[in-house]
Image (spheres, rainbow, N blue to C red):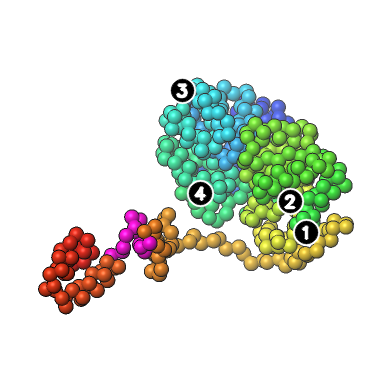
Amino acid sequence: MSFDSLGLSLPILRAIEDLGYTKASPIQEKAIPAIIDGKDVMAAAQTGTGKTAGFTLPLLERLSTGPRPKSNHVRALVLTPTRELAAQVHDSVEKYGIHLQTTSNVVFGGVKINPQMMKLRRGCDVLVATPGRLLDLYNQNAVKFDQLEVLVLDEADRMLDMGFIRDIKKVLALLPEKRQNLLFSATFSPEIRELARDLVNNPVEISVNPPNSTTKLVEQSIYVSDKKQKSVILAKLITQGDWQQVLVFSKTKHGANRLARFLEGQKITALPIHGNKSQGARTKALEEFKSGKIRVLVATDIAARGLDIPQLPQVVNFDLPHVSEDYVHRIGRTGRAGETGKAYSLVCSDEAKELFAIERLIGKVLDRHEMEGHKPVNPVPESKLDTRPIKPKKPKKPKVGHKDGQRSGENASGHKPANKNKRHSTKPGGGQSNNSKKRVATSLALNLSVVRNAPVLQRLVNSRFLASQITI
């Protein structure tokens, strides 16, 4: 379907034509008319299917008319989980709105806040932000939401998976109740769907792919290996295949640093990108990777979210992700916008559990290969596809008598550790417990009953020390 039939105005159609696009993707065909009509939308589409344009184009169409934003006010808010994704979305907003009078801005952490506050003084039609920095700006009265019309959660599943739900709820409490809500994501797990329904009102649900499916344009395979041989095998794959651009996923920041150093030692240009890197370093690494100055970009899952790299031919999973759905997100970096791509995974025996979970999720057994001269000493068990449906995890029920933040041991009836005064106590201030005091009082009362008339003991009973311990 052409963009002309989706209800977009001429300035936006000109921008689309300038960028070389002629036909709308399936997600765009379904989402654009619904958003222009003002409906809430919850859409699931794989990375690389054009979902960013799926909400950016109709958003700009809606904002092309109406009152201009006041100082520090915004008309549309787009929340993203990472800085890279925020920058990418803002770039799309600027490109598609080049022939419009709309204004936009982007804010995220890792950089100085004062320049962002200065830019927000003019107000903007579209603000793209990460949750933490947005709340910081709001607390400093740098952004106001009285004119807000539309809220967009991009990569909504990852936003909630990364623990942003509290920040999202804080943001929602600041927004006008009357607004349009749009949730876009690569996938929606059952738990995320249930949670998302609390954030949208009677949404139009759009799904252009089966849940957690992988695109047919990506050729997937694995190389079985011992853990210590992975770096060597990766270097051989790059040199033997003459790969000029490959995105490699590491599950840890330190692992990404080590792998990049190893590849540099093998005369393969590489840079790591992860959360410990400054925003400037991350931006520079991405620019050098896109321009071809470096061949390998080693990234963690969070840092790679939102990376928009056109025609990326190869993706490598140096480590398998613990969460199976992350595999879908990872390989979605290649095979984008109709292009073909290849996804390789280096798998050792310790990762058999993760491998089987991924194969169950995507519904097929991945082809296996061995690098010549690197037969693994510890073989990876053969795969046997589990075709049983994956049941959503039930939320854990709170323990009886247990409060959030309370340690389970505080409810136990057994031995209690002694405090600094060597007295066993469950009270934070130390001292003897009530039960212990009662036992002391009972014992002393029995002994004193025999010699109640003894003058010395009677004086002791009346003393300040025993008066605080017993009752006669």
Query: Label 4 neighbourhood size at 10 Å, few (<14), some (14-19), many (20+)?
Result: some
> Label 2 neighbourhood size at 10 Å, few (<14), some (14-19), many (20+)?
many
What amino acid is at disc 1?
A: Asp
- The disc, 2 or 3, on the residue closer to the chain's N-terminal end is 3
Mark nearest the camera among 4 and 1 is 1
Q: Which structural element holds mark 2?
A: loop
Local SS, label 3: loop
Q: Amino acid at mark 3?
A: Ser
Q: In 3D space, how far apart are the residues under numbered discs 2 and 1 (Cα atoms)?
A: 12 Å
Judge depth for marks 1 and 3 and give the one in front. Answer: 1
Q: Between marks 3 and 4, how big is the CA–CA gap? A: 31 Å
Write the start and end of the magenta stretch as one range: 422-434
The answer to whether residue 202 is left or right of residue 283 is left
Disc 2 designates what residue? 318
The numbered mark, 4 or 1, whose residue comes first in the sequence reads: 4
Gap in angstroms between the C-alphas marked 4 and 1? 41 Å
Q: CA distance from mark 1 to mark 3?
A: 59 Å
